Image: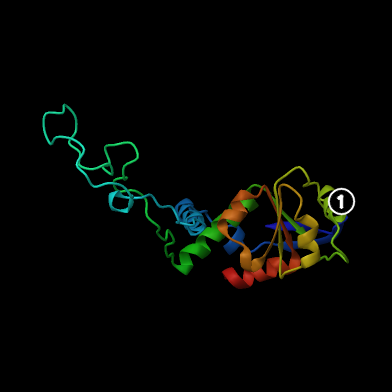
Amino acid sequence: MEVNVYNIKGEDTGRKITLNESIFGIEPNDHAIYLDVKQFMANRRQGTHKSKERSEISGSTRKIGRQKGGGGARRGDMKSPVLVGGGRVFGPKPRDYSFKLNKKLKALARKSALSYKAQENAIVIVEDFNFEVPKTKEFIAMTKNLKVSDKKLLVVLPEANKNVYLSARNLKGANVQTISGLNTYRVLDAGVLVLTENSLKAIDNILM
């Protein structure tokens, strides 16, 4: 699949670049995508939730009612789970939600996500660029020139670029990522993927 290469002014450079069929042209594997996104979301969970159980609540241990004949559930002290203000039965405890996935499966998930974007014609290739200073106006002008300003945007850079990152930081619906931070969730969450030429080469090196 061939795509045109543009500059940040939105002008066609006259060059074309071929997307790697083994990355951007595979049959997407939905289950691999599901597992990778599930892992990403699970790894973001803090897991610090906690409720107090019966033994952790402060209060009197005096038995407050008869064992039988009260017409309701039997209860002991004020910390009984059947009473308001009592302990919680099997409540949440701090835990780690993260789990492991094989590298090959994660690579397949990323290839599948990129293939979906290629099928949707939602990939724009631009020449490598840089801003002399952080300037949000320049970033907005670039998105308008590329005709992607009305879409949720993911700009992928080959390496960290502070000026570009700061230029897009305050914009809703615009996200700047390096190749190392590219994952299945972010690719699928974006409406349009903007890749620089060096980013494309880096993706080939990582996923092949």
Location of mark 1 (residue)? 141
Q: In this orientation, which residue lies closer to the viewer: 143 or 74? A: 74
Q: In this orientation, which residue lies closer to the viewer: 54 or 197? A: 54
Residue at image location 76% in from the left, 50% down from the top: 171
Q: Is residue 201 above or below residue 53?
A: below
Residue 149: x and y, percent? 78, 46
Q: Report which quarter residue 13 is drawn in.
A: bottom right
The quarter in which the N terminus is drawn is bottom right
Q: Report which quarter residue 14 is drawn in.
A: bottom right
Tell me if 1 is positioned left or right of 62 in this view.
Answer: right
Helix, strand or loop under label 1? helix
The quarter in which the C terminus is drawn is bottom right
Residue 25: x and y, percent? 59, 57
Residue at image location 47% in from the left, 56% down from the top: 42
Residue 176: x and y, percent? 71, 59
At label 1, the amino acid type is Ala
Tally the marks. Answer: 1
Tell me if 60 is positioned left or right of 108 in this view.
Answer: left
Do we see residue 16 in this rendering?
no
Question: Hey, which residue is sitting farthest bottom in the picture?
Answer: 205
Q: Residues within 10 Å of mark 1 (few under 14, many from 20)?
A: some
Tell me if 105 is positioned left or right of 17 in this view.
Answer: left
Residue 24: x and y, percent? 61, 59
Q: In this orientation, which residue lies closer to the viewer: 149 or 25? A: 149
Residue at image location 43% in from the left, 52% down from the top: 49
Do we see residue 53 in this rendering?
yes
Q: Report which quarter residue 5 is drawn in.
A: bottom right
Looking at the picture, the colour scheme in use is: rainbow
